[in-house]
Image (tube, grey):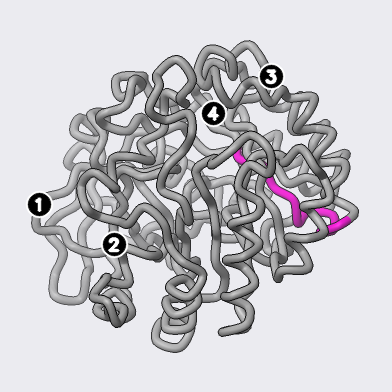
Amino acid sequence: MTIPTLGTLSGRKLVTDLQSFGLQIGAQTGGIARKGGAGPSDHKTITIAGQTVMVPVYTSGARHSPFQASPPDQHGASTLLRDGQTLGTIHFPAAPRFYGLSTADGIPYWKIALLHGRDTLATTVHQTCIRYADRRTSCQFCAIGQSLEADRTIAYKTPAQLAEVAKAAVELDGVRDMVLTTGTPNVVDRGAAVLAESARAIRTAVDLPLQVQCEPPRDHGWFERLRDAGADSLGMHLEAATQAVREKIMPGKATVSVDRYMDAFASAVPIFGRGQVNTYILAGLGDSAADILALAERLIALGVYPFVVPFVPISGTPLENHAPPSADFMKSVLAPLGRMLREANMKSTDIRAGCGRCGACSSLSAYE
């Protein structure tokens, strides 16, 4: 059987369902995976109908998913089943070649940056956050400290290390863009300074489009400094659509209000360009579909691309037992959002770098 392409109604539905339910896999599956960390995690990369997507596999929900994958063959090919019925063949991409290298001081490249989706390199420059250690202020979905505690990364990636790995990833694996995010190190520049330093070093070493991601700095002059350092696009992630949900789920980050984000977006879009400023919205944290779409309408009017993804509960966090959004809920958001983006002529394919361009954590691009 052949799995329909993502551009079809049945293809969109399949990927939306997979990202909501997750996928049962065997221990021997291999391939590219991400566990713990600062952002959407507990996923594995799969290629389905020629598109590369991230699907939850390490969550409690995935263990009870109606979707199952057979053990892959030597080429990474696996049979995808739903409730025991064969749907077709998927692939688990092999680990990229740069993962096999290490720095001169013995740090594996994969501890410095990881491949996301098909061809996006991503890193958390500071694997710490001023809010993480105190559950009164931390984001309840965040696992930024888990990968550090498990020795899957290092606390701080230097500009030289990032430049070295980025250059190798481009030359060995054809990486096309890179995401630089960070835990929030302070409440002034909120990470913009370390991101500018890192971006400058990478762009000196290799011609690679970059997205930098941080909370809105107090001084909006940082947007020009980040662009001048080599950033092509900017991510400032609201995570939730309403201030009430933000205060409940991320009490520390919510002190930077939705209104302050909107002011920052209005300052950043003229610097980076329409569609080159993005925000991440996690559907399923408590906002209604109407809440998410109302915010998306405001964002699109400002020239900000709202990248809406299904919330994935990460093991070991306070929200590990929080149910992910249903596939029907995701479709109730993504279908009208896709229409809004089409009408605004705002396309993920026009984003020069970042999560929206990669698109692997959401089926949103299939609805555009």
Identity of the amino acid at label 3? Asp
Question: Which numbered disc flags the more N-terminal residue, 4 or 3?
Answer: 4
Q: Is residue 121 above or below residue 15?
A: below
Q: Which quadrant of the view contains residue 236?
A: top right
Question: Which numbered disc flags the more N-terminal residue, 4 or 2?
Answer: 2
Query: Was residue 186 drawn as part of the magenta stretch in this picture?
Result: no
Instruction: Decide: few, some or many residues near mark 3? Use Cα within 10 Å; few <14, some 14-19, many ≥20.
Output: some
Instruction: Decide: few, some or many residues near mark 4? Use Cα within 10 Å; few <14, some 14-19, many ≥20.
Output: many
Mark 2, residue position: 32
Tell me whether the residue at label 4 lies in contact with that at label 1, contact meaning CB atoms closer than 8 angstroms: no
Identity of the amino acid at label 4? Ala
Q: Is residue 40 left or right of residue 152?
A: right
Residue at position x 34%, y 59% from top?
46
Q: Position of residue 357 (x, y in %)?
A: 61, 60
Stretch in magenta: 271-280
Of 276 and 45, which appears nearest the observer?
Answer: 276
Instruction: Decide: few, some or many residues near mark 2? Use Cα within 10 Å; few <14, some 14-19, many ≥20.
Output: some
What is the number of the mark on residue 27? Answer: 1
Give the distance between the C-alpha atoms of the residues marked 2 and 1, in whole angstroms. Answer: 13 Å
Residue at position x 66%, y 62% from top?
196
